[in-house]
């Protein structure tokens, strides 16, 4: 399994690792948990751009450290800016987490955008980089994926590059995540894992080896199918009264703004005062389930996953349009 991961990093990212630099875990979340538990102490800080995947701050808190949230905006494409990263770094900063493409926004950092961030990090040698690359192969249009240690080799010795089989290979239930990083960090993570889950399921490892070493041509076909769904959802949501949906570079989510519906009332007379009110309205009145932006640390937005059929997406977006039109 480790050999398959080593070859994947070499083939896809130009990163070279040895077996003692590889950690294989029971899912990507497990990788993050092991890394944070192995390195964080009370008083430490972890920089997390918002919107963020919901588990990041909670895992940091479980490890006894403090999440330091850096808010982004639709104007910056939901991407952390170099000056904001610089301002967030203190002598207590232990990690910065970069997720590209992102859950929930789908935002992907270009090589130049990553280089601007890594230039900042090169000035702060005490800060480690956690690169969550789980959506690496789900990118659209002319976007090219890069990972921080690939863009700035000077960060190689303090970067943990995480990936897995869940998203690229549609293997969420198999629970295999993996990472490449410095030997000392990998060894510390192994100590945590050896006293919790031990090794991941051997059957899942066998399946993951086949995924990583087998034909890879279907990945582009799958991304093309997701792109078609993305375009469908973005178009229909932008046609809804009061909603605005940027076009993501990757992943299978959109993160529209619902600022235009705040202050309006539902047919039942309830005022929409937050993104939580709005998503509850969609669920209760139209049977459409989406996630409110507050859960991801940036409001007023909501997340739609388009990892389903075009038929379901078309009907869901039609109901969202209908719900928005009914607001007074």
Image: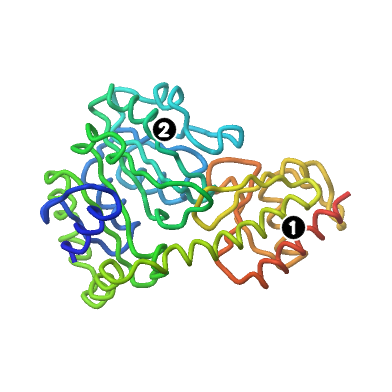
Query: Is 293 left, or right, of 130 in this rendering?
Result: right
- Res. 176 image quadrant: bottom left
> What residue is rendered at 21% in x and 59% in y?
7
Front position among marks 1 and 2: 2
Which quarter of the rendering shows the N terminus? bottom left
Query: Is 54 left, or right, of 44 in this rendering?
Result: right
The residue at which mark 1 appears reads as: 281
> What residue is rendered at 30% in x and 58% in y?
30
Q: Residues within 10 Å of mark 1 (few under 14, many from 20)?
A: many
Q: Secondary structure at mark 1?
A: helix
Q: Position of residue 77 (x, y in %)?
A: 56, 37
Query: Is 291 left, or right, of 120 in this rendering?
Result: right
The residue at which mark 2 appears reads as: 112
Instruction: For marks 1 and 2, give the CA distance.
Output: 40 Å
Q: Secondary structure at mark 2?
A: helix
Q: Nearer the viewer, residue 320 or 43?
A: 320
Q: Residues within 10 Å of mark 2 (few under 14, many from 20)?
A: few
Above or below, 294 relative to 226: above
Q: Position of residue 114 (x, y in %)?
A: 39, 35
> What residue is rendered at 12% in x and 44% in y?
184
- Res. 157 image quadrant: top left
């Amino acid at each position: 399994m480790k050999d398959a991961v080593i070859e994947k990093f070499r083939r896809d990212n130009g990163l070279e690792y040895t077996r003692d630099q590889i950690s294989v875990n029971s899912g990507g979340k497990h990788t993050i948990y092991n890394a944070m538990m192995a390195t964080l102490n009370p008083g430490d800080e972890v920089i997390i751009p918002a919107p963020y995947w919901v588990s990041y701050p909670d895992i940091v808190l479980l490890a006894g450290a403090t999440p330091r949230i850096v808010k982004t905006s639709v104007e910056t494409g939901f991407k952390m800016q170099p000056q904001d990263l610089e301002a967030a770094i203190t002598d207590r900063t232990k990690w910065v987490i970069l997720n590209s493409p992102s859950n929930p926004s789908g935002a992907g950092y270009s090589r130049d955008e990553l280089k601007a961030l890594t230039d900042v990090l090169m000035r702060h040698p005490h800060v480690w980089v956690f690169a969550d690359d789980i959506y690496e192969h789900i990118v659209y249009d002319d976007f090219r994926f890069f990972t921080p240690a690939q863009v700035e080799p000077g960060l190689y010795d303090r970067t943990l590059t995480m990936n897995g089989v869940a998203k690229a290979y549609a293997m969420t239930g198999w629970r295999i995540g993996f990472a490449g990083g410095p030997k000392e960090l990998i060894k510390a993570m192994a100590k945590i894992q050896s006293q919790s889950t031990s090794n991941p399921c051997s059957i899942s490892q066998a399946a993951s080896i086949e995924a990583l070493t087998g034909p890879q041509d279907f990945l582009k076909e799958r991304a093309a199918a997701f792109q078609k769904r993305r375009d469908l959802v973005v178009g229909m949501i932008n046609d809804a009264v009061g909603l605005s949906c940027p076009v993501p570079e990757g992943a299978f989510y959109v993160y529209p703004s619902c600022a235009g519906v705040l202050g309006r009332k539902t047919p039942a007379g309830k005022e929409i005062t937050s993104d939580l009110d709005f998503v509850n309205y969609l669920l209760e009145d139209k049977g459409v389930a989406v996630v409110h932006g507050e859960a991801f640390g940036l409001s007023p937005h909501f997340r739609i996953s388009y990892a389903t059929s075009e038929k379901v997406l078309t009907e869901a977006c039609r109901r969202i349009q209908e719900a928005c039109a009914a607001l007074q």
